[in-house]
Amino acid sequence: MLTRQDIVRNFTLNVEKERIKRNLTQSQMAKKLEMSLSGYKKMISGVTAKIDLYTVQLMHNLTGKWIFELIDDYREETEIILKLKEMSEAQRNFINNMIEFESYFSSVHEDSNDYITVFIPTGNMVDGMIYDSANFTKINAASYRKKFGEDLFCGIKITSDHLKPVYNLGDILLICRKAVREGDTGIFLNKETGKVYIRKLRPSSSRILEPINDCGEPLHIDSCDESAEKWINFGYVLTKIRG
């Protein structure tokens, strides 16, 4: 938890960073924050022990940054807000609709925590699949929630036979969003191609994504190589519900 001193120090450091980024003089920055030049200098030098809320609001108006960004107070909830800021209006509207749906679902189901969201891909579900779109449904997974607890994040429905005999058409994979461990079957997304792979992470010194049957070729991901940045580790398979 940040102390008063941490908050004041972080805020003033960020004020100066934003001033330099905008190529403003201290006098110009002081004017934008509706304060005197001497008052501005006292603030950034640490003489001022308190920051006026109006100054914080003016900084938000100038930079578009929220107070948690200006004082470097990052946590799980604020990270979500930052991701939303980077999305298009259409994407934010979609996510907002999902939030409203989840909120409504919780209000009418006292046991809503026993339910999980299942993604049903509507794209061409083959090796190196591109999910053009997906439908969603809810299933009661109380017994699995009891077993896996909060590790159980969501489900993905298998909509083709290309992963037989490991996964059949209609199976639901229960997913944990934590990092894929060696030997786990994970869901891997390539940011450049938009393709998604269901692969097993082979126990070895190099990261090799191995097909879970004869469909597809092994993929090599060198964690020391820039190519690793192209991949998103969505999570790994906890178990399956046979369809």
Image (spheres, rainbow, N blue to C red):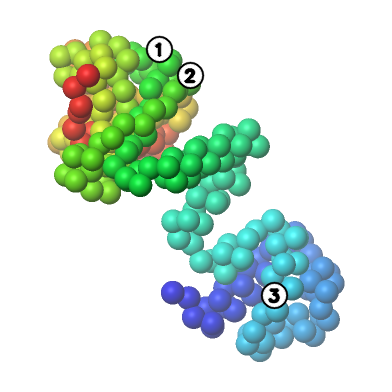
Work out whether residue 200 or residue 144 is closer to the camera in this orientation and state it: 144
Residue under label 2, please give it.
Answer: 132
Residue at left offset 45%, top offset 60%: 75
In this rendering, the answer to whether 53 lies above or below 81 is: below
Secondary element at image label 1: loop
- Quadrant containing the N terminus is bottom left
10 Å crowding of disc 3: few (<14), some (14-19), many (20+) = few
Marks 3 and 2: CB-CB under 8 Å?
no
Residue under label 3, please give it.
Answer: 53
Q: As shown in the figure, which amino acid type bears the numbered disc 3?
A: Leu
Give the Cα distance between marks 2 and 1.
8 Å
Residue at left offset 69%, top offset 82%: 43
Would you identify the image quadrant in which residue 157 lies?
top left
Residue at left offset 57%, top offset 45%: 84
Secondary element at image label 2: loop
In the image, which disc is placed on residue 124?
A: 1
Q: As shown in the figure, which amino acid type bears the numbered disc 2?
A: Asp
Q: As shown in the figure, which amino acid type bears the numbered disc 1?
A: Asn
Would you identify the image quadrant in which residue 13 lies?
bottom right
Q: In screen coordinates, is 6 left or right of 147?
A: right
Give the Cα distance between marks 1 and 3.
52 Å
Q: In screen coordinates, is 222 left or right of 13?
A: left
